[in-house]
C-alpha cells in the first residue's frame, strides 16, 4: 500500500461503485519493473525471431547505460533485451506487451458525479466501501473503516447492469447497486451513501422496521381485557378460528376477513387489543415454527408521514410488500395493525386533512386492493372514525367495524381489582378488596360528579336538565390513574410514620376518584360531549360547565 508520504495530491473520499479487473496500459516503467510478466508484441521485429522467446517471459532488469531497453528471460535460459517504448529509442518503438496474468484490479469510484477508475494494490475493496484515493498518482490508498450510514431509500425497480431505481427524498433516481447487485427486493429499504448514488447497505423486506420487540412488549391476552366481550369474540373469530377450523370454514365457503376497524374514545383498550392481537399472532406463528416479528407489522400512522412528497407512499408500498413476502414464504396471513390511522387515511378534500393525503390515501387503496392476494389482514385503530376516508373503510376492504366503548360498572370494577393485584398494593385491615372495589365503582359512576349541565327541550316542549358526569368520560386508562392516585395518597399518609403499617383505606379511593374528577373537569371534552348529545343535538338549548367541578 502506498504510504501517505509518497502521495503529493491531497487524499479524497469516494464510494466504490464496482470493482473490475482489466489489463493496465503498459508504460516504459512497468515494462522495466523486475518480475513483470510479458510477451513479445506481434508485429515487432523480434516477433517469431527465436522459438525460445515464444510464450511468456519475465523481466529480469535493465541497465542504466541502456535507457529504453529491458532484459527478459524466457524459460530457464534464453534471455534478450527489448525496447520498452521510450521516445528517445527508435521513436518510441515497443517490443513487449503485458501478459494476461498482469491484470490489475480497479475500483470504479463515484467522485463528484463522475466515475473514475483507480487501481488497487495490496488490499481488497468491495462495492459500497468508502475509500481514500489520490489523484496524482491515481490510485486507491486505503479503505475507510466506518459504519455504513446514510439516507434511507426504497427500491422501486431493479434494472440491468447493477442499477436500481429508488424513491429518495420525494423523487426517483437511478443508483448503483454496488455489492448488493442481484440481492435487492422491490419496495425493500436500502441505505445510500453521502452522494445519494450508491447503495451501501440493504435492509430489504426482512428488516425490523414496523416489527415489535417481543422482550419489551407487555404480554396481553384476550382474558386481560376487561369487558369488551363483543369486540374480543369478533376479533377471535376473524384471527384465530379460520386457522383452528379450516374444514368448517371451507365447508361454508367462508373466507378470512380482509380487515377491520377498531374505533372508540381514547384510553378504552384499543392499544391493549393490539397487544392481544399480537399474542394471537405469536401463537399462530409458533405453531408453525415461524419468526413472529415478520408476520405482525405494527404501524403508527403519524410515523408514516414524511416532509418529502412520495416517501410516505413508498413506506406504504414497503409495508404491504413485507406482508406479501411473509405470506408467500409461510402461507400464514401477515397482520398489519395501524394505530392512529386517521393521520394517514383521513378524508380527502374535506378540510380536515392536509394536501399530502391526496396522494397517500390513493397509495393505500392501491395496495389494499390486493390484500386478498397478499394474504394480509389489516386492522385499523382510531379515536376519530368520522375523519377516515370512505373509500378506505368501505365493505370489502374493512369487513367489520367494532366500537371499543367505555367500560361499564362491571368492567371498571375488574380493571380496578386487576391493577390493585398486579401492583401488589396493600389494603387496610379495616376493609377488603371487594368493599374497596364496590366503593370505587359507586364513586366513579356517581351522578353527583357533574361536569356539564345541559338544557334540552323535551317532547312536551318543556326545558329539562341533563347532567354530563365523570361516568360519561370514564375510560380503561382512567381506572389505573385512580388506583395510582389512591396509592399516592395512602403513601403520603404512611410517610408520617416511622414504619408503614396500613394499606389503602376507603377514603383513599374516594379521594383518588375526586382528584381525577377535578383534573378532568378542567378539560372541554368536546368529542365526548358531542357523542353524549348526539341523539338530541337538535333539542339542546344550552350547555353550562359547572364551576364547582373545576375548583
Image (cartoon, grey):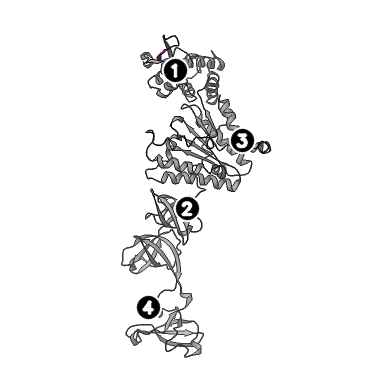
Q: Which numbered circle lies on residue 240?
A: 3
As measured in the structure, the alpha-carbon distance from the residue carrying label 3 to the one carrying label 1 is 40 Å
Residue 209 forms part of the magenta stretch? no
Mark 2 or 3, nearer chain start: 2
Within-10-Å neighbours for mark 1: few <14, some 14–19, many 20+: few
Inter-mark Cα distance, 4 to 1: 97 Å
Residue where numbered disc 2 is placed: 202
Q: Which residues are magenta?
A: 453-460
- Per the image, label 2 sits on a secondary structure element best described as strand
Disc 1, SS: helix
Q: Which residue is mark 1?
A: 536
Per the image, is 458 magenta?
Answer: yes
The answer to whether the residue labelled 2 contacts the one labelled 1, judged by CB atoms less than 8 Å apart, is: no
| Mark whose residue sits in front, 4 or 3 | 3
How many marks the image carries: the answer is 4
Quadrant of the image occupied by residue 15: bottom left
Q: Secondary structure at mark 4?
A: helix
Number of other residues with Cα within 10 Å of mark 3, as a class: few under 14, some 14 to 19, many 20 or more: some
Q: Position of residue 514 (x, y in %)?
A: 43, 16
- Secondary structure type for disc 3: loop
Q: According to the image, label 4 marks what residue?
A: 29
Residue drawn at (45%, 22%) of the image: 531
Which is closer to the viewer, label 4 or label 1? Answer: 1
In the rendered image, residue 21, in percent from the top left (x then y), is placed at: 46, 69
Give neighbour class at mark 2: few <14, some 14-19, many 20+ (Cα, 10 Å).
many
Q: Are marks 2 and 4 in contact (CB under 8 Å)?
A: no
Label 4 Cα neighbours within 10 Å, binned few <14 / some 14-19 / many ≥20? few
Amino acid at each position: 500500500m502506498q504510504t501517505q508520504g509518497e502521495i503529493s495530491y491531497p487524499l479524497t473520499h469516494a464510494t466504490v461503485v464496482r470493482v473490475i479487473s482489466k489489463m493496465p496500459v503498459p508504460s516504459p516503467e512497468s515494462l522495466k519493473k523486475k518480475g513483470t510478466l510479458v510477451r513479445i508484441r506481434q508485429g515487432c521485429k523480434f516477433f517469431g525471431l527465436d522459438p525460445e522467446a515464444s510464450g511468456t517471459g519475465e523481466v529480469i532488469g535493465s541497465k542504466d547505460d541502456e535507457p529504453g531497453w529491458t532484459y527478459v528471460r524466457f524459460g530457464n535460459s534464453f534471455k534478450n533485451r527489448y525496447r520498452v517504448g521510450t521516445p528517445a529509442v527508435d521513436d518510441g518503438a515497443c517490443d513487449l506487451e503485458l501478459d494476461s496474468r498482469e491484470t490489475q484490479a480497479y475500483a470504479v469510484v463515484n467522485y463528484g458525479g463522475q466515475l473514475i477508475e483507480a487501481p488497487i494494490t495490496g488490499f481488497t475493496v468491495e462495492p459500497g466501501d468508502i475509500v481514500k484515493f489520490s489523484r496524482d498518482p491515481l490510485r486507491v490508498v486505503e479503505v475507510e473503516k466506518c459504519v455504513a450510514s446514510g439516507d434511507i431509500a426504497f427500491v422501486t425497480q431493479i434494472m440491468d447492469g447493477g442499477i436500481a431505481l429508488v424513491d429518495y427524498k420525494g423523487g426517483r433516481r437511478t443508483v448503483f447497486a454496488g455489492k448488493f447487485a442481484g440481492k435487492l427486493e422491490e419496495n425493500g429499504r436500502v441505505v445510500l451513501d453521502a452522494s445519494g448514488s450508491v447503495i451501501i447497505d440493504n435492509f430489504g423486506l426482512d428488516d425490523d422496521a414496523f416489527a415489535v420487540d417481543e422482550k419489551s412488549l407487555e404480554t396481553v391476552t384476550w382474558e386481560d381485557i376487561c369487558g369488551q366481550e363483543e369486540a374480543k369474540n369478533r376479533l377471535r373469530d376473524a384471527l384465530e378460528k379460520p386457522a383452528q377450523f379450516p374444514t368448517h370454514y371451507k365447508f361454508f365457503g367462508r373466507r378470512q376477513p380482509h380487515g377491520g376497524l377498531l374505533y372508540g374514545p381514547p384510553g378504552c383498550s384499543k392499544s391493549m387489543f393490539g397487544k392481544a392481537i399480537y399474542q394471537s399472532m405469536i401463537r399462530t406463528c409458533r405453531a408453525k415454527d415461524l419468526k413472529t416479528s415478520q408476520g405482525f407489522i405494527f404501524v403508527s400512522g403519524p410515523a408514516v408521514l414524511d416532509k418529502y412528497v412520495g416517501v410516505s407512499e413508498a413506506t406504504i408500498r414497503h409495508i404491504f410488500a413485507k406482508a406479501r413476502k411473509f405470506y408467500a414464504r409461510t402461507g400464514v396471513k401477515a397482520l398489519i395493525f395501524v394505530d392512529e390511522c386517521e393521520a394517514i387515511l383521513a378524508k380527502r378534500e374535506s378540510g380536515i386533512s392536509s394536501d399530502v393525503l391526496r396522494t397517500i390515501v390513493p397509495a393505500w387503496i392501491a395496495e389494499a386492493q390486493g390484500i386478498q392476494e397478499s394474504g394480509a389482514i389489516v386492522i385499523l385503530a382510531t379515536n376519530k372514525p368520522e375523519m377516515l376516508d370512505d373509500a378506505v373503510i368501505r365493505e370489502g376492504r374493512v369487513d367489520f367495524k367494532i366500537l371499543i366503548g367505555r367500560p361499564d360498572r362491571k368492567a371498571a370494577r375488574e380493571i380496578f381489582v386487576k391493577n390493585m393485584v398486579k401492583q401488589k398494593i396493600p389494603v387496610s385491615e379495616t376493609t377488603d378488596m371487594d368493599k374497596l372495589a364496590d366503593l370505587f365503582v359507586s364513586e366513579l359512576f356517581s351522578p353527583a360528579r357533574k361536569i356539564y349541565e345541559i338544557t334540552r327541550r323535551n317532547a312536551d316542549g318543556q326545558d329539562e336538565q341533563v347532567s354530563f358526569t365523570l361516568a360519561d368520560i370514564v375510560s380503561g386508562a382512567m381506572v389505573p390513574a385512580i388506583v395510582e392516585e389512591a396509592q399516592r395518597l395512602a403513601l403520603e399518609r404512611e410517610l408520617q410514620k416511622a414504619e408503614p403499617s396500613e394499606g389503602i383505606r376507603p377514603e383513599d379511593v374516594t379521594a383518588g376518584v375526586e382528584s381525577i374528577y377535578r383534573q378532568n373537569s378542567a378539560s372541554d371534552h368536546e368529542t365526548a360531549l358531542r357523542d353524549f348529545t348526539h341523539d338530541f343535538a337538535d333539542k339542546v338549548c344550552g350547555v353550562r360547565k359547572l364551576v364547582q367541578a373545576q375548583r
